Image: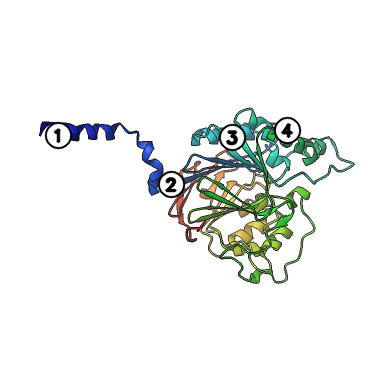
Amino acid sequence: MFRRYSAFFAALALLAAIPAQSKGHKSVSSRELKITVVDVEGGAATLFLTPEGKSLLIDTGWPPDMGGPQPTPGELPPPPASSSADRIVAAATAMGITRIDYLEMTHYHVDHVGGLQSLLKKLPVDTFIDHGPNQQELPPNANARERATSPATLYPGWVAAYQGHHHITVHAGQTLKIGSLHLQFVASAGKVINMPLPGAGELNPLCTHIAQKARTGGEENVRSLGTLITFSKTRILDLGDLTWNKELELLCPVNKIGKVDVYFVTGHGMDLSSSPPTAAFDPLVALMQNGPRKGGDPDVVRTVDQFPALEGFWRLHANAQYPEMDGDPHYIANLNGEPDHAYPLKLVITWDGKITVTNPRNGMSRTYQARATEAGY
């Protein structure tokens, strides 16, 4: 009898000694995707952490001497209080990330690739993802500012960065798995997917009488990577700075992507993108990576506000140019007239499709339920 009880208590002691985290990934409730939308002052930098501990960073924001208040014409802007790279590192530290497993560069404009060199001094990167070579040439009459910030000047630094590392150039239609994330590239290098994705393909009535738009903001916008990210039941769409006309190729006459749950408003909310047919994406949550004087253009805000199922429109900054377009300030991470604390927006998405968005400035959180069924891949 004594021997039997001794064995029982020994087994209990052994169980108690097992670290709690060793059971973490086996529990459905702990299978959470964490996302930090970093405030890089109207650039782009979004950090993902999968339940398996894999990290994905999409874009790197501005170089250290850019990203603050808008300059007078022809001058470089003053630097922000902290650089884009510093803000990405702060977000990574808060998430427990010590290296970037995958870095996706949507395109080579300075507000997306500019923070790369500074970031690499602070965080190692294993795998680099892009759409292929830069195709935006330097204008022959470019001034000093345009030369310093042009894709033609910045792209060689990207090429140098991935030497000796894993490097993936993706095409439209290609897929990639990162832990429990499934990435479907729907646009790349000026091409979009040819056929609708499974479950998509509905006729889009919003395409009627929609004209093409000549303005693109540069060839690199046209060539932006567009990524549909699926985590269990939740679909997340990030099209980088993909342009109006390329949106129409994805959405007209049929919606090739289908409905999504979380939507990063394309191009910082500038009116180079966000054509009326984007309402067919019908997201529950919209996230706008705008700055105080960049993005959030009135026509775009009106378009997003009219998305049929939209339950939450979240923004990184209040709009100094069009304050009347701001909406509820509780959904804005950084307000005008206050010190720039570079508050991000944070998301936690559970395996069963609960999407919680938190504004660290005021602690407000809202939870939404994804509508998609669990993916079958």
> Closer to us: mark 2 or mark 1?
1
Measure how far apart labels 2 and 4 are at the Cα level. 36 Å
Q: Nearer the viewer, residue 25 or 111?
A: 25
Q: Quadrant of residue 258?
A: bottom right
Rendering coords of residue 159 (x, y %): 73, 36
Q: Amino acid at mark 1?
A: Tyr
Furthest residue in direction left, as rendered: 1
Is residue 228 found left or right of 7 in the rendered image?
right
Q: Earlier in the sequence, mark 3 or mark 4?
A: 3
User: Residue under circle 2?
Assistant: 31
SS at mark 2 in the image: loop
Q: Which residue is mark 3?
A: 87
Q: What residue does disc 1 label?
A: 5
Q: Residues within 10 Å of mark 3 (few under 14, many from 20)?
A: many
Residue 218 in sight: no
Q: Nearer the viewer, residue 355 or 201?
A: 201
Give the image quarter of residue 245. Answer: bottom right
Alpha carbon of mark 3 to alpha carbon of mark 2: how far?
26 Å
- Badge 2: few (under 14), some or many (20 or more) residues near its Cα, within 10 Å? some
Q: Dividing the image into 4 quarters, which one contains the N terminus?
A: top left
Q: CA distance from mark 1 to mark 4?
A: 65 Å
Marks 1/3: CA distance?
A: 56 Å
Amino acid on which the number 2 mark rests in the picture: Arg
Mark closer to the chain start, 2 or 4: 2
- Mark 2 in CB contact with mark 4 (< 8 angstroms): no
For residue 160, the mark is 4
Q: Tell which circle, 1 or 4, labels the residue nearer the N-terminal end.
A: 1
Q: Residues within 10 Å of mark 4 (few under 14, many from 20)?
A: few
Q: Amino acid at mark 3?
A: Arg
Mark 3 against mark 2, which lies toward the viewer?
Answer: 2
Q: As displayed, is residue 325 above or below residue 20?
A: below
